[in-house]
Image: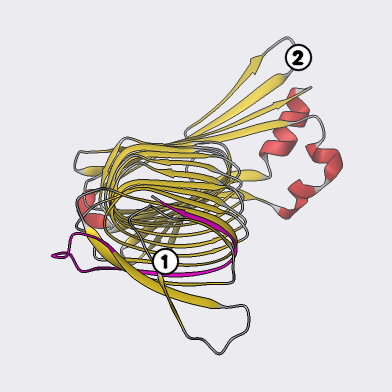
Amino acid sequence: MKRIILFVMVSSALSVAAQERVQEFAWSYPAERFKELSILNRLGNVDIRQGGEQFEIQAEIRVKAKSLEKADAVMQHVRIEAVESLSMLNLSTILEKEFTIRRLFFGVSIEIDYHVKIPKGKKLSVANKNGSVLAGRFSGDLNIDIVSGDFKAQQVEGDFTAKLDDGLFEVQQVNRFSGEFRSAEVKLHAGKRVKVSGEGSNINVIKAEEAIAKVAGGSLYIGNVNQVELHAAGAKCEIQDVAKSLRADTRAGRLVVHSIHPFFSTVEVSSSSTKVALSFRPGGGFHINFKHDNIKIVLPNNLVLESKPTTKRKVFIESGFVGDKPFNSQVELNIMGGEIVIQ
């Protein structure tokens, strides 16, 4: 294991309100040297680009204080370290323990930025505590972990995992994606296999072949999807254009499903204390099995349900068929509390 600390340039500049010290770092490695690059940052941004036959990394520590002496004192406790381990290169922002002393930190502004160019096909992991991560088109596996900040990218190929708190997450196109969000604004414009979990977040998936979502609070929108699996509690959920199958388990919230296609295979909804609205496109047909506890029900005029015997008090089981006989799609509903509207 090899450790490298590279100081390229130290400079100072005078502004009206503060004095500034800057340290700049640079590394360059051939592409075949590493399979993966890992970056751990704390107080700044990470800019990612792909291309070429080398890993090219530039980093900058910028400290502003009321005096150069103060800036120098703080700079002594901040550094960037590169560690080579087998086929991985690890870059880390190091804040020494003494730096946490309040009197040293008071009145000081610190910004640590990375500019990374990585060859295509290499794996990249970025953990950023307080700052944003920007990427254009990325080919390869990508892992992002942001505590407070934004992430934006155009396209990510390969396996993409992300975790983001308190920020904006926006990607135009993903392939295989898994994301965890808290108090975040999420916009995924298109994906093949998308898995998201959110707590107090607003998640918007415009288009996906397959979507799995688990949300608590906040809101969720999924549009133009082949198959979707949903688990929600206390959330407002809206799904548009379901082509194949829908499985949903909701608690104390709202679920609205627009435009279920005529050739869908399965719709399964289990809910409690939830307002549920399902809209089926005309031209198809489906069998429905409906279990409920005497909730408010709105059905289309051509859907007639027949009651089935049950041993449970205040529980009703009904079934029926609507549409054209050649279709054999199945609708399974278990709605306890709340209300349901079928159109």
The residue sitting at the top extreme is: 16
Q: Earlier in the sequence, mark 1 or mark 2?
A: 1
Q: Secondary structure at mark 2?
A: loop
Question: 141 left or right of 218?
Answer: left
Visible residue check, residue 64: yes
Residue 119 location (% of width, % of height): 23, 45
| Magenta residue check for 328 | yes
Total of numbered circles in the picture?
2
Task: Please give left or right for residue 269 compared with residue 123 in the image.
Answer: right
Residue identifier under label 2: 17
Quadrant location of the N terminus? bottom left
- Residue 316 vertical position relative to residue 134 in the rendered view, above or below: below
Q: Amino acid at mark 2?
A: Ala
Q: Which label is found at residue 1?
A: 1
Q: Secondary structure at mark 1?
A: loop
> What residue is drawn where x is 77% and y is 28%?
69
Task: Decide: few, some or many residues near mark 1? Use Cα within 10 Å; few <14, some 14-19, many ≥20.
Answer: few
